[in-house]
Amino acid sequence: MSSIEEVTGYCFKNKELLREAITHKSFSSESDSRGHNERLEFLGDSVIGMVVSGYLYRRYSASDEGHLSKIKSALVSRPSLARWALALGLGEHLFLGVGENLTGGKQRASILSNALEAVVGAIYIDGGLAPAEKFITAWLAGQKVELLEADHKSALQEKIQKKHKTPPEYEVLDAQGPEHEKVFTIRVKLGRKVLGLGRGRNKKEAEQSAVESALIYLENHEV
């Protein structure tokens, strides 16, 4: 936990709060413990949104609301937050259930981005807005906004076709649950190589999650 405190630049007074922030629901269920990070994730999402909005308002004084919204959406997107979590090495510190661990949960975009939000929420609860804002703003200062605004699916296709001369393929693996609340699982692959796996409440959401996972995978692996 001390290494997380080093990369965030914040030392927790309540260490249990930090532990809660890095505990996934799957681990909590398997270990019969109550604490997991979904409540902190909810809070952290709002804190990040507020800090990013203020930062953009001050930095882009000539931009209208539409442009600011577009930049904010890119900055707080799942791939953007997941890349931040990867840069911090957050995945290696997460408490995950056995199944999530075996299926690559420590590098899954949804788990990483949610955990990052939970850590921000924990910093906010433990120390207030000032340290949370300092942590988020330090990250914002290093972001290249023009790259973040690109469409992720188009970016993945361009990346794959440039090197392999063939587009990625998408495959629906599963659809579980009643009609009104189905959960779809989609994978994106290149030939036989699986690049990413995503889940969502509809096919579009699952596909987007798979694309985000694939982009993160390609940043760290050669195909």
Image (cartoon, helix red, strand yellow):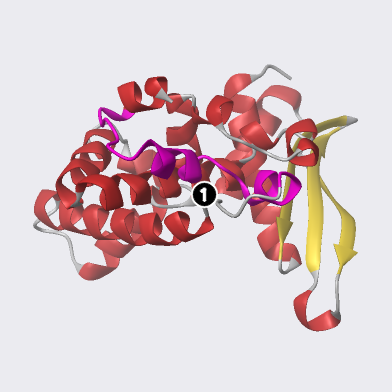
Q: Residues within 10 Å of mark 1 (few under 14, many from 20)?
A: many
The answer to whether 39 appears left or right of 217 in the picture is left
Residue 145 in view: yes
**Residue 33's x, y, as percent?**
64, 50
Which residue bears the numbered disc 1? 114
Give whichever of 11, 223 is nearer the camera. Answer: 11
- Picture quarter containing residue 34? bottom right
**Residue 6's x, y, as percent?**
32, 21
Q: Is residue 146 magenta?
A: no
Could you tell me which secondary element the residue under label 1 belongs to?
A: helix
The answer to whether 220 appears left or right of 72 in the picture is right
The answer to whether 128 appears left or right of 92 in the picture is left
Residue under the image location 76 percent in, 77 percent down: 181
* Total marks placed: 1
- The quadrant of the image that shows the N terminus is top left
Residue 157 in view: no
Q: Is residue 13 magenta?
A: yes
Residue under the image location 81 percent in, 37 percent down: 189
In the image as oriented, which residue stretches furthest toward the top? Answer: 222
In the image as oriented, which residue stretches furthest toward the bottom? Answer: 180
Location of residue 218 with respect to 150 vertically, above or below:
above
- The quadrant of the image that shows the C terminus is top right
Location of residue 92 with respect to 77 vertically, above or below:
above
> Of the residues shown, which amino acid type is indicated by label 1?
Asn
Give whichever of 154, 19 is nearer the camera. Answer: 19
Give whichever of 202, 12 is nearer the camera. Answer: 12
Span colored in magenta: 8-31
**Residue 149's x, y, as percent?**
41, 49
Residue under the image location 81 percent in, 55 percent down: 185
Give whichever of 200, 188 is nearer the camera. Answer: 200
Residue under the image location 27 percent in, 62 percent down: 67
